[in-house]
Amino acid sequence: MESDLIGKLQREAYKVIYGHGPVTGQEITVTHGIPGGWKRCSELEAVGMVYAAVEKNCSVTGQLAIGWDVTDRLPPATQEEKQDRIQRCLDPLRRKVAKCQKCPHLVSTRRQTVFGEGDPRAELAFVGEAPGEDEDRQGRPFVGRAGKLLTQVINRLGFYRRQVYICNVLKCRPDAASGNRKPTRAEMLECLPYLKAQLGQVRPKVIVILGGTALEAMLEPEESISRLRGEVLDWQGTPAIPTWHPAYVLRNPTPQVRREFWSDCLEAVRLLGYVVRKDDALWLPRVNA
Ligand code: URA
């Protein structure tokens, strides 16, 4: 491949992943055996870029330089199996959650419940604390600023959002006149059976617990998130790694916090059996001011 084409490819990919310039409708062609620049990106970086490009509606064709077909990373379940799991197990639970009246004060302020989304057979699940305003409006988890950061990290790990599972402990927005508030212990206890049932159906191989509040609700640990983050804990028989909540990372975007957040997420894919290289470990999530 000619070097000006490689340069174009890199510029387009960086536009997509780092957010400079218009991206929609761009086409990125990633072909086998690209010499030069692309060899400098790690496997994980290349895959992450391609997935990010696809999520932004850029079409991607061909194979990665390092010889991975993008589809290599798709979980082995067939579409029929996934549909079946959604229709038989997750949809009835979603409907039950949508009608839930257990916390009347939340019922009276929510626009809708936010059940969760993603691959019903995902290997990797992310669990946050509760929907915020954007999520309450759209009915989807992690779609606001914290969600953008989470999506960036998911892509960089080499997944589409739709290939992982994303949900919260609480399915309703804990509304407060002054804005979002932390869910109460009573609210989390009411909602926890839904999370157990939900992840019991998805059966991820690894769970990333986002933030101290979700950690408290799920594991009632004696130590704080700052002591436990990055440790491999056990949640109902599934390895679970607590890390900073993306909103915390946005509020405290120091290199240390961003590095810890990223390295905890990398640990999750390491547990899944993916090879993590040195330059993957050196990457830092981008946090816009
Ligand atoms: N924070 C959360 O914990 N969950 C969301 O879905 C969004 C923000």
Image (cartoon, rainbow, N blue to C red):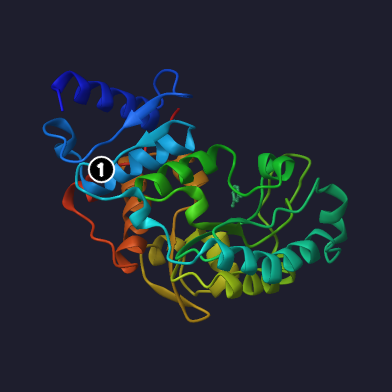
Location of residue 152 with respect to 86 vertically, above or below: above
Q: Is residue 254 visible?
A: no
As rendered, which of 228 and 242 lies closer to the eye? Answer: 242
Spot occupied by residue 140 in the image (x, y as percentages of width and height):
65, 47
Label 1: state its secondary structure: loop
As rendered, which of 72 and 204 lies closer to the eye? Answer: 72
Spot occupied by residue 219 in the image (x, y as percentages of width and height):
54, 74
Residue identified by numbered label 1 = 64
Horizontally, is 195 left or right of 6 in the view? right
Q: What amino acid does circle 1 point to?
A: Leu
Spot occupied by residue 95 in the image (x, y as percentages of width and height):
79, 62
Q: Quadrant of the N terminus?
A: top left
Q: Specify few, some or many for label 1: CA neighbours under 10 Å numbering under 14, 14-19, or 20 or more.
A: many
Residue at image coords 73%, 50%: 173
Question: Number of labelled discs?
Answer: 1
Spot occupied by residue 251 in the image (x, y as percentages of width and height):
48, 39
Q: Residue furthest bottom?
A: 237
Residue at image coords 81%, 55%: 106
- Disc 1 under 8 Å from ligand 1? The reply is no
Horizontally, is 3 left or right of 82 in the view? left
Q: Quadrant of the C terminus?
A: top left
Residue at image coords 73%, 62%: 94
Residue at image coords 64%, 68%: 84
Quarter occupied by residue 254:
top left
Horizontally, is 205 left or right of 169 in the view? left
As rendered, which of 89 and 231 lies closer to the eye? Answer: 89
Q: Is residue 118 visible?
A: yes
